[in-house]
Image (cartoon, coloured by chain):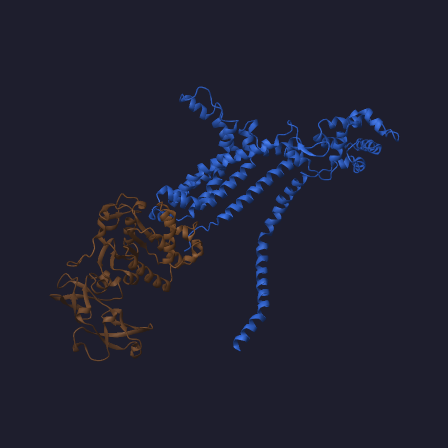
Chain colours: A brown, B blue
């Protein structure tokens, strides 16, 4: 997607012109071209119904593309059944076999491959050690907690050293604290084992925490593929800006475009300078995107004092421990968020008139919502 | 200090807490009991009571005791080695006269005839020819003169064996066993030893029908469990359809289909596949076909419910881990359906054990199952003792099987379902 970027490793997986429809009327995946590099942790991020899970299922072999071809290590795999793809998968609800013990569950992929007994035992032991569950080897899945089941599912998908590991919202059923802990564990496993992971989630913070690259899906189309920081700092359109991280949106009209920057008139009459990322030209509508932590609140002065200075009315403040949020009314947006240092919110009264300001490079002019 | 106070308080409140818990639980148990009491009473009077009464008849033996009380008393001290003494003959003569007067002699005659064929004649001829109470000391002479059988030791052991009040006679007979003249348990004479064969036949037919139901029902249940709800509901109606028709109608339909001039034979003949009609009914084949048809839903429904609980994610997981479809089925799917297979098989097998109407209508003489004989002894020959004994043996075998099944299932420890 971004020209001039060096590709560190050859593509392990290549989706080429993939389309998928279930009912013959609506395309769930509209036109997918995606390269997954060897050893990377790539996340397919998007709201439900965006086509990310369908993409994963096509890669696993449980769904067949309506059109296009998928290559795994240069080999077309559209007609290869799932059990011959050598892809490990972690399911949303773990799908641990309830009638087998933990050790038997982990040994399953080895035994269907006729790995010799001694070696299989050794590898199961190593896998149990990796997830720190040696003592629970003889338990059944029903006797484990959600986090433990998750670890077993992970060990089972890794024990046969697959070329690729797929994870379908594996942490969805866990509570927040455990989820965050598991995110780090999975990330660590990825780094120490050097495996290639394709991870599906609708949780953007999970995606930012774990991924080398994130593919943002919406409406059956990949909106943007990039590193987490690039995705956050340089979203290519309003959907990505809004979906990844907190974001403030201001609707306006482009007045002039000068090189990388443009002047945008807001509905209230004020005008701001913004980076022209995705605007069609002077006179077109646009959505300005500003991150809450890039905005400062000024208690005095007036709008003529500097560029990008807008009048605002304080609606509410929220104390969140490590930081505080001020909710303002800015140019018709009643939920404009500004991130503050904790304690700074004390001086703001609701109904008070203040000014906000932000640097032109922190304000992106994107496609109108 | 505070900690000590706290532990003190804990130990002091422990007992009342336990008692309170018990009281709370007792109230709940009482409520639960109150909910089932009506059904419990109903079952007690209409099911458990009659069955217990019926089972009691398998060992109950009071006919001879009632009709020949003095003889039974006189024989109580007899060791059975020689002929009984004069006192027993006198008691018998007096009993027979009394029984003739009250017209109860036939009751004892019927019971004694079960034990020894021809005993009825001995007793009735004696009763007919005994004019009056013999002179003291001549009872033996008089009776032996009327019927020389009274000189045989077996005649007297038959009476002693039947003197009750409880007997193992019927239960032994149900297992093709009997007591010889010395009271030892021996095999029954070949012309009476039919029940073991019938038990074996009953079990074989039931087993065959269970196997057929499983083979035919498993794919149907799988289809039902994997189809989308709309179509699976439609299919389910077809599975349940047999339940809405009477058993008799369904069985008779098989007669129409399978008889020598029936639909199947006529079609085969018309197609030129056969010249002579095949014998499809009034034999083991007909019994198995008709019973399988009737019992199939009892196999399909438990299978369906166990399959419905198996998430499709398991098969996907197995495939993603490298298992080819057959391996995944055998190692992941099939083991999880075992509780359903067990429940369905047990249900079909137990129902099949008690089948009566279907084999009676579509079976030949050599295909009648145990229920047929129980019915025969209950309604035709009124030999309730033997009917009860056969029923008791069948019940015992069924209970044993159910226990074995219970143990097997427990050993499996299938937790079932995913923990979400």
Instruction: Give the residue furthest to the front.
Output: A118
Instruction: Give the residue furthest to the left.
Output: A258
Give the camera-side residue of A88 and B397: A88
How far across and down, in percent of the image, does residue A277 sit?
17, 63
Q: Is residue A205 left or right of residue B395?
A: left
Q: Please say if B254 is above or below A183.
A: above
Instruction: Give the residue furthest to the top.
Output: B275
How far across and down, in percent of the image, does residue B394 sit?
60, 38
How far across and down, in percent of the image, does residue A41 sit?
27, 57
Q: Please say if B329 is above or below A44.
A: above
How far across and down, in percent of the image, does residue A34 sit?
22, 53
The quadrant of the image that shows the N terminus of chain A is: bottom left
Give the camera-side residue of B325 and B249: B325
Give the camera-side residue of B278 and A262: B278
> Residue at coordinates 19% horizontally, 66% vertically from top-left?
A364
Q: Is residue B199 left or right of residue B241?
A: right
Give the camera-side residue of B122 and B173: B173
Dividing the picture into quadrants, the one containing residue B371 is top right
Q: Is residue B26 left or right of residue B330?
A: right
Q: Please say if A13 is above or below A238.
A: above
Asked if residue B179 shows in the view, the reply is yes
């Amino acid at each position: 997607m971004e020209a001039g970027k060096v590709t560190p490793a050859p593509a392990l997986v290549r989706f080429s012109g993939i389309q998928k429809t279930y009912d013959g009327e609506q395309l769930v995946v509209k036109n997918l071209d995606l390269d997954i590099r060897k050893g990377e942790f790539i996340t397919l991020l998007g709201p439900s119904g965006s086509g990310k899970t369908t993409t994963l299922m096509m890669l696993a072999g449980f769904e067949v593309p309506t059109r296009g071809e998928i290559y795994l290590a240069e080999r077309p795999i559209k007609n290869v059944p799932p059990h011959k793809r050598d892809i490990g998968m972690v399911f949303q609800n773990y799908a641990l076999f309830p009638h087998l013990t933990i050790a038997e569950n982990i040994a399953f992929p080895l035994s269907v491959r006729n790995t010799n007994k001694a070696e299989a035992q050794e590898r199961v032991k190593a896998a149990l050690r990796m997830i720190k569950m040696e003592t629970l080897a003889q338990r059944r899945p029903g006797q484990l907690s959600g986090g433990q089941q998750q670890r077993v599912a992970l060990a089972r998908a890794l024990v046969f050293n697959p070329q690729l590991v797929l994870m379908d919202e594996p942490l969805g059923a866990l509570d927040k604290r455990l989820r965050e802990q598991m995110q780090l564990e999975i990330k660590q496993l990825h780094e120490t084992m050097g495996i290639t992971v394709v991870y599906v989630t609708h949780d953007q913070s999970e995606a930012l925490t774990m991924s080398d690259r994130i593919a943002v899906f919406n409406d059956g189309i990949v909106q943007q593929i990039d590193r987490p920081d690039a995705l956050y700092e340089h979203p290519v359109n309003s959907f990505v800006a809004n979906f990844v991280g907190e974001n403030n949106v201001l609707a306006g009209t482009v007045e002039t475009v000068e090189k990388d920057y443009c002047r945008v008139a807001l509905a209230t009459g004020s005008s701001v300078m913004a980076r022209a990322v995705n605007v069609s030209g002077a006179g077109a509508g646009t959505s300005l995107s500003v991150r809450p932590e890039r905005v400062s609140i000024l208690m005095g002065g007036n709008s003529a004092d500097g560029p990008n200075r807008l009048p605002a009315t304080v609606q509410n403040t929220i104390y969140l421990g490590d930081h505080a949020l001020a909710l303002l009314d800015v140019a018709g947006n009643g939920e404009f968020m500004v991130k503050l240092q904790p304690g700074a919110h004390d001086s703001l009264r609701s109904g008070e008139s203040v000014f906000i300001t932000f640097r032109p490079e922190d304000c992106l002019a994107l496609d109108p919502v | 200090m505070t900690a000590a106070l706290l532990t003190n308080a804990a130990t002091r409140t422990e007992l009342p807490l336990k008692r309170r818990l018990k009281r709370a639980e007792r109230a709940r148990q009482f409520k639960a009991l109150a909910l089932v009491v009506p059904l419990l009473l109903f079952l007690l009077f209409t099911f458990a009571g009659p069955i217990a009464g019926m089972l009691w008849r398998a060992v109950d033996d009071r006919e001879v005791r009632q009709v020949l009380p003095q003889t039974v008393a006189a024989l109580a001290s007899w060791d059975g080695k020689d002929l009984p003494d004069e006192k027993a003959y006198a008691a018998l003569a007096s009993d027979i006269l009394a029984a003739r007067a009250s017209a109860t002699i036939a009751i004892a005659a019927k019971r004694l005839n079960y034990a020894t064929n021809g005993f009825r004649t001995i007793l009735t001829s004696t009763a007919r020819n005994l004019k009056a109470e013999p002179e003291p000391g001549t009872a033996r002479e008089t009776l032996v003169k009327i019927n020389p059988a009274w000189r045989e030791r077996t005649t007297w052991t038959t009476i002693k064996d039947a003197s009750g009040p409880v007997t193992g006679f019927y239960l032994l007979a149900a297992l093709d066993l009997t007591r010889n003249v010395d009271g030892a348990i021996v095999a029954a004479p070949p012309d009476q030893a039919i029940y073991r064969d019938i038990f074996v036949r009953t079990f074989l037919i039931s087993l065959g029908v269970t196997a057929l139901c499983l083979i035919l029902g498993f794919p149907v249940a799988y289809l039902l469990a994997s189809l989308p709800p709309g179509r699976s509901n439609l299919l389910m109606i077809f599975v349940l359809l047999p339940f809405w028709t009477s058993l008799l109608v369904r069985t008779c339909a098989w007669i129409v289909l399978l008889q020598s001039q029936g639909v199947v034979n006529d079609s085969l003949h018309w197609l030129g596949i056969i010249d002579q009609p095949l014998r499809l009914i009034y034999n083991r084949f007909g019994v198995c076909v008709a019973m399988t048809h009737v019992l199939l839903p009892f196999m399909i429904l438990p299978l369906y419910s166990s399959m419905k609980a198996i998430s499709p994610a398991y098969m996907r997981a197995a495939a993603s881990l490298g298992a080819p479809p057959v391996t995944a089925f055998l190692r992941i799917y099939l083991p999880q359906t075992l509780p359903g297979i067990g429940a369905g098989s047990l249900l079909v097998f137990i129902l099949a054990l008690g089948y009566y109407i279907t084999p009676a209508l579509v079976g030949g003489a050599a295909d009648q199952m145990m229920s047929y004989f129980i019915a025969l002894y209950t309604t035709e020959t009124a030999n309730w003792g033997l009917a009860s004994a056969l029923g008791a043996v069948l019940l015992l075998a069924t209970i044993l099987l159910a226990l074995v099944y219970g143990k097997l299932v427990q050993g499996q420890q299938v937790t079932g379902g995913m923990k979400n």
